Amino acid sequence: MGAYLVRRLLMLVPTLIGVTAIVFSLMHVSGDPIRLLFGPNVSEEKVLEKRAELGLDNPIPVQYWNWLTRVVQGDLGLSIHVQDRVATLILARIGPTLELTILALILTVVIAIPIGIISAMRPYTIVDNVSRFVALFWVSMPYFWLGIMLMMVFGLRLRLLPISGRGGPLWTFAGLRSALLPVLTLGLPPIALFTRLTRSAMLEVVNEEYIRTARSKGVHEIIVVVRHGLRNALIPVVTLLGLRLPWLFGGAVITETVFAWPGMGRLLVNAVMERDYPVVQGIVLVIALLTVLANLVVDFAYTLIDPRIRYG
């Protein structure tokens, strides 16, 4: 177990170097950031002055090394638009974004896995058919359309929930009310996907020999399903969980924009509109790092679900 975890941590080093190289390169292949910032009518003297100020007159490898050295020290640069530290801007916004993504993830797991199990244990019944139809409906809903529909129904017509902004910390009533619609917007489409995957995975294991053996020994059906069936069916579900995390962060960008949620996604959209490339670079890097770390947690979860993996 310890050797497996150390090996996985060591594998993170080249992955993180590759992530930083890609994030750094993307901002430079899109064009001259200084000309994109000031537009076509700026004087050449001002372009040269700003480029020297930001260190963009150095060769690309030197720029990358200087940037990487600062990133390791926690310095993501200075925002061109608001003249504030990028790390400070991101730290102020990362909490609300994690609130949405973690709550959406919890909502997905809590709802999708039980429904998927019930559908698999009662295949082709009314319950199974209804759950498959609902799953197909939700999985085809774009985030922005779903957010607008929820906003119109629960915010504008029924006037039950606020339609924009963050009412406060999540543990307060106002904060919970304001988070409900964004979390539903972010969580409902993945629920559909995970329900279908859990159903398929459970259908593959419910007829296995060890399941029939457990039943023949008189083990209670719930224990058979949860301990013997679900545990073996969880590997593909956990795998998809890791793969879907970047989608959740991408969905958070759209959801935060629709609901005026003060998170990293909204900050990213504003930075793109203002051509504030250090902020864009910093946010993309943070999202990439969160995704890498989340997948590391998923790898650790494998070893808990299936002990054979830790020796592989």
Image (cartoon, rainbow, N blue to C red):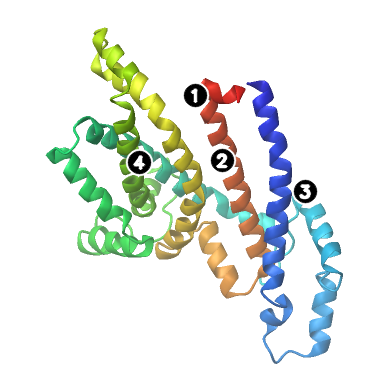
Residue, disc 1:
306
Q: CA distance from mark 1 to mark 2?
A: 16 Å
Vertical comparison of 203 with 294: above or below:
above
- Other residues around mark 4 within 10 Å, as few (<14) / some (14–19) / many (≥20): many
Q: Is residue 79 visible?
A: no
Residue, disc 2:
295
Element marked by disc 4: helix
Marks 4 and 3, the one that precedes in the sequence: 3
x%, y% of residue 303? 54, 25
Vertical comparison of 7 with 307: above or below:
below
Would you say 27 lies left or right of 165 here?
A: right
Element marked by disc 1: loop
Amino acid beneath label 3: Val
- Other residues around mark 2 within 10 Å, as few (<14) / some (14–19) / many (≥20): some
Element marked by disc 2: helix
Marks 4 and 2, the one that precedes in the sequence: 4
Residue 72's disc is: 3
Amino acid beneath label 2: Asn
Please report contact status of discs 4 and 3: CB closer than 8 Å, yes or no: no
x%, y% of residue 269? 53, 67
Marks 1 and 3, the one that precedes in the sequence: 3
Q: Nearer the viewer, residue 242 or 39?
A: 242
x%, y% of residue 204? 33, 31
Residue 197's disc is: 4
x%, y% of residue 295? 56, 40
Marks 2 and 3, the one that precedes in the sequence: 3
Amino acid beneath label 4: Leu
